[in-house]
Every structure is written in structure tokens, then in C-alpha cells.
Image: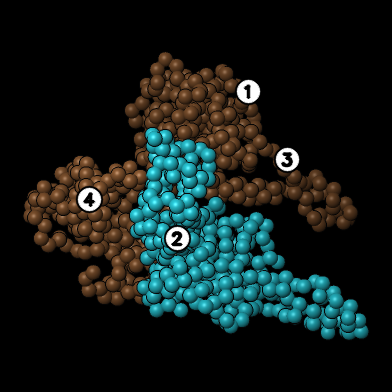
Amino acid sequence: MFTSVDDVSTRLAETGYLASPAVATTVFLADRLGKPLLVEGPAGVGKTELAKAVAKVAGARLVRLQCYEGVDESRALYEWNHAKQLLRISAGRDESWDEARTDIFSEEFLLPRPLLTAIRGDDPKVLLIDETDKADVEVEGLLLEVLSDFQVTVPELGTVTATRRPFVVLTSNATRELSEALRRRCLFLHIGFPDAELERRIVRLKVPGIDTALAESVVRVVGALRAMDLRKVPSVAETIDWARTLLALGAGTLDETVVRDSLGVILKHRDDIQKAAAKLDLDAV
Amino acid sequence: MNAVTDQDLAARLAGLVDALRSHGVRIGTGETVDAARAVEALGLADRELLREGLAATVLHGTAERPVFDAVFDLYFPRRTGAPEGGSGDREDLRERLAAALADDDTVRLGRLAVEAVDGFGGYGSSPGSDGWSSYQALDRIRPQTLMARVRDEVRGRDGGGGFADRFLEDEIRRRIEEFRRMVAVEARRRVAERRGRDEVARRTVAPTADRVDFLFAGKDRLAELRRTVQPLARKLATRLAARRRRAARGTIDLRRTLRGSLSTGGVPMRPVLRRRRPARPELVLLCDVSGSVSGFSDFTMLLVQALHDQFSKVRVFAFVNRIDEVTGLLEHGAADAEGLGARIRSEATLTGWHGSSDYGMALGEFTERYADAVGPRTTVFVLGDARTNMGDPNLAAVRELVRRARRVHWLNPEQRSLWGTGDSAAPEYAQLLEMHECRTVRQLNALVGRLLPV
């Protein structure tokens, strides 16, 4: 899919995703080694966006499995279409048992869920398993077969093996420690907050109308906020939101009033806002 | 990088993996092979790409990254040997350092770090020093004193003012910190050239969080440790559940087996197992929270608190030389890990006439005031280093405790070889109850998994 690490960066950048060298390298390796990519990091740094961008670059279909507490086999892998099976049985009353049995467990009655969809068919696909840490531990076991051999076993049909391996991205917010077995099958990538230079570029790309100096101050303020001991530090998504807000407010430069009025865009807790206001000397005016 | 043959590269990779393993990072052969394939795909031209590539293939979590970075710097150094040029003039170096800090130019900072170690870090007989010390280099150059100068320079250039200007000092401080780190890496590399990489990788790289001694862990290390409480508690909970399942299999109940055999003509076809009464065990923790061991007891308290749903009753007592119940302070949700130690010390009555720990007095007070807390179903854990400051160890109180409780364990964060030295009463206590060495999270994990009652 990619020829070099630089190729990854430039092509991702064309879709509007600015990748740090670490991200580009790991995506390149995941493609080369054919291994799933496990992405960890705080909320709002672009973990899901990465999968979308890769899909766009590769011209692949994005198959998404959103994990949540209680997601199970029938939601992730496949399910038999019971209603249709019943219809089929009642339609063919005079058939022998063997005929009916072989018939109702055929592809026609199978409802493929994301994992099965991703490994069937010949078109390129990107499989995104989002928020893996939200799923229960048992689901991880389910993923193991899919991720290491890219195959799914349906007892009635046999084993479905991928003819074309999808590019797999798993994301996790690390609310729960994923099992060692799952980690071992993946390349590991931690996306942290970008450095100031990269974040400036991201802001300028996502908020086209913004003045360079303003973008710079925005990034510096956010950087300072991240160094504080807050309950929820602002992420890249918040930086972009803030830049958009400032643009909408028509603020050309940052000053105490503007920052104080718009602090709610980047900080989502009351005590965080108070703490930040105190540290930034906003009350000094 | 100098000419690297395939052989050499393979050996280097194996060495890197080995060094990481010796620091407790779990890496299988599969990952090593992946790492080699990554090197093949990436080439050796760009060192930072190589670093990211190797990190992606051999690591499984963020906690291992600092160790990895340090080891990587040793096995894939930026350069070898001493730098060329470099005037060796201190003022000149400081001048250039200030300029680089003002420009926030990491590449130049890296070069200056190399020069700094070469020019000011060497000790012993010159030429060709016996060793390299980052401490000495930093002590002579004193990058922190450049602060004001750099600040003024940046202000002068940008015209100052502006809202974001108020962060300038913090930003410069971070750059200086980065420079210090670079100097440390460089010094370690130079030492490694002299003494052999493997040796240095094993000794001078800071260990992963679960292997840090409680007593010597710095503040940031303790914060890191506290973050491991939740996953650790979860692991322990599964282990306890597994033990309970095993325990439920139990022994054969002969009476009920024979009675069941009547229907099969007296042949015992189905053995009946003795049913276990699901007793929810009670837990009492006695924690020494005096300054010397507070990191340890804080951590252990949090761990036990995280396990609270496994036990019907957990009571936690803290002491220095007087004892007081602190269970309320650990209430679920209210336990703010950071300030826990401070809160306990400020809200509970822990000290009497003086501020140093006295095990004898505290244990005596416990058996007097809280006698009802310990019963035949209670397992007691004492956490502390058993250093009584020459006071009476009050063995009678301990004997009383052992007699009344189901089990009494003592977790001692000190090295076993230090027990009994100085004012330590560890051997005396160890005769009356089980005392275990518990220096790191790893040991604690194993001990708690084994000792907690099911």
C-alpha cells in the first residue's frame, strides 16, 4: 500500500491527517508486516481519525466495530437470520430433514457482522475496532483468531479465511488494561499530544482562516494548560474547537477577557476552569 | 551510524531485547523477529524512524517506553567516539547554549549536550577519562542559570507583550530540562563505550515502575505506581476468584457420599464434595505512615481499598506512635491518591509526644482500644519497616494479636539483609508471625495474591 514512511506522511496529509513521525512509521510497518495496529492515547488525539484517513488513502472500505460493554459474538462476528430460517422451513414442508438442514445453514441465512465482513470479499478494507477497552474481556478472546490468522470459524459452514487481509486498527483509551495475548498480536502505537510545531500545523489545516500568530498563541496556551494538573487536559480536538470559536468571535489576538470567556470550550470541568483561571492570572485584570 | 553488517545488527537487536527483558519487559521471540523485519523495512538511515519502528514492534504498553528509549540510545547510539572540534571553553559553550535555547533548536541542543559531556563531564586522568558524569557536566555548565538571559533574549526578539508571553518561563524551563536529559543520555553512552553496553544497560537504566523499591521511589515514580493500582487490583480479584473456585472443589464428604450410594446398592457412584461455607473474610490493615515508609503504606492501602468488594469488611488503621482508624478516609471514590498520605496525617491522631514511629506503643494501643476489630475470621496485615527508634517492641501485644486473629502477616519494605540492623526489631517480630520482604510492586503483587484469605 505504501512505499516508504515519507509516502505515508504525504498521502495521509493529502486527506487532511497530519501524522507525527511515530504515527507514520507505525502505519507503514503495520502495512508491511501485515499486523494489526493497536492505538492507545487520550481522547481526542485522532485515533479514530487515523483509521478513517488510512481507509481514504488506500481507497478501502471502512468497516467499523464499535465496542461497548456487552458487545458479543452475534454483534461482532455473525448471526444466523432466524426469522428467515423459519420462513424457509415452513416454505418447504415436504422436504426431507437432510435437505432442510443443509439448506438453512448456508450463506444465504448468515448475517455477517463487522469482523466477518472485514475478512470476506476481495475488495480492500480497513477494519476499525473502536474503543476496544470498553468491550468485556471475553470479546478479546473472540478477536484473537481474527487478528492473528484473519479467519473466522462458523461451525456450520467451516472456516472463512481472508483472501485479502484487511488493514486493522484497534483503538483504546486505556480505561482497562487489554490482555497480553491481544497486545502481542498487534503493533503498539501510543498517540500522545502532538508537539507544538505539529499542533500549529494541525490548527492551520483544520481552521483555514486563522491568523498565524493567533494559532501560535492558541497552541502555547493549550500547551501550558496541559502542563497543569487538571482533571481533563485539553486535547487536539479541543484546540481546534477553540481556534474555531476564536475565529467566530472575531478575536485577532488573545487577551485576558477573550480567554476567560472562551475557556469553557477547552476545559470541561468547573474546578478545572477555576484552577486554570487562577494559574493564568486571568483575574489580574 | 558506522558500517553495520547483518551479523552485527542481529547481535545488536538480540542485545537490545535481552537488556529490555532484564528490565522486566516481556518480549517473545515473535516480537524479536518482527523487530528485525521492521529494521529491514525501514532501513538504518533514519534513527528516529528506527526507534519508533522498534518501539512499535517490541513494546506492548506506554509504561515501558522510558526504559526502551534509554536502552535504545545505548544500542543504537547517534554516533560513536568523541565529537570533533569543541573549544572546551565554558563561557563559549554557555553562550551557544543560550542561543540554542532561545531558538528552541533541538538538533543544536543535542550537539551541545555532546560537547558538554566531552568537555566537562570527564573525570579521572586525562587524556581519555576514566568515566563520564552527567552530574559533573551539568554542575559546571549550570544551564538553569541561563533562564533569565534566554527569556530576555526571546522577549527582545519577539517584542514581548501578548497573552501567551506569560508561559515563556515554563517553556524555557522545559527546554532546559530536555537539555539535561540529553546530557544524561550522552554521558551514559560514553560510559557504555568504555565498560560494555550490556553492563551499562542493566545497571544505569531506570527500571520499570513495578520494580522500583518503595523506599527509594521518587515522587513521580510513586504517582506512576498509584496508576497501576486499578489494573493490579483487577488481576488480583481474578486470581482470588480462581482460588475460590478451586477451593470449592474441596475434599470428599464421606457421610453424604455413602448416603447417596444407597440408591446404587451401596456402590459409591457419585462422590459428594464437602460444601464450603462461603465465608467472606475480614481484613485489618495496620499501616506505619511515618515519613520513611509512607510511599509503601499509601500504595498498599490503595490496593486493598481497590479490592474492597472482595471482602466483607476492611478496616484500616494508621499509626506513627499512636494508632487511629482511617477507614473513613479511604471511602470509595473519596480516595484521592495524591493527597492520601497528607490527609491521613492531618486528620487522624497519629502522634503523641514526639513525631517518630514507635511500634510498641502503637501496637499496644491497638490491642487495647480496637480489640473488637480482630476476631477468628480476621486476617491482619501489618505494613512497616519495624524500626522502633530503640523503643520497646512490645512483643506481648503482638502475641495477643496473633492469638486472636486468624492469620497475621507483616509486609516489610526493607531488604531482608537489613532486618535487625540498627533499631530494626524485625527479627523479634518475625519469630512471632510471618514477616515477608515486600520491596516492589512485583513482590507486593505476588504476596497479596498468595496471602489474602479466600
**Pointer 4 residue:** B157
Amino acid bearing label 3: Arg
Relative image position of residue B166 (x, y in whole percent): 33, 42
Q: Give the letter of the chain under mark 4.
A: B
Which dot, 4 or 1, sits closer to the camera?
Answer: 4
Q: Residue furthest top?
A: B353
Relative image position of residue B218 (x, y in whole percent): 36, 40
- Judged left or right of residue B179, residue A228 is right
Q: Residue furthest right?
A: A94
- Judged left or right of residue B316, residue B103 is left
Q: Earlier along the polypeptide chain: callout 4 or callout 1?
A: 4
Q: Do labels 4 and 1 share a chain?
A: yes
Q: Do labels 2 and 4 share a chain?
A: no
Above or below for B152 versus B264: above
Q: Residue at x 49, y 20 (%)?
A: B349
- Seen from the viewer's position, the closer of residues B444 and B134 is B134
Disc 2 + disc 3, Cβ < 8 Å:
no
Q: Give the letter of the chain under mark 1.
A: B
The shade of chain B is brown
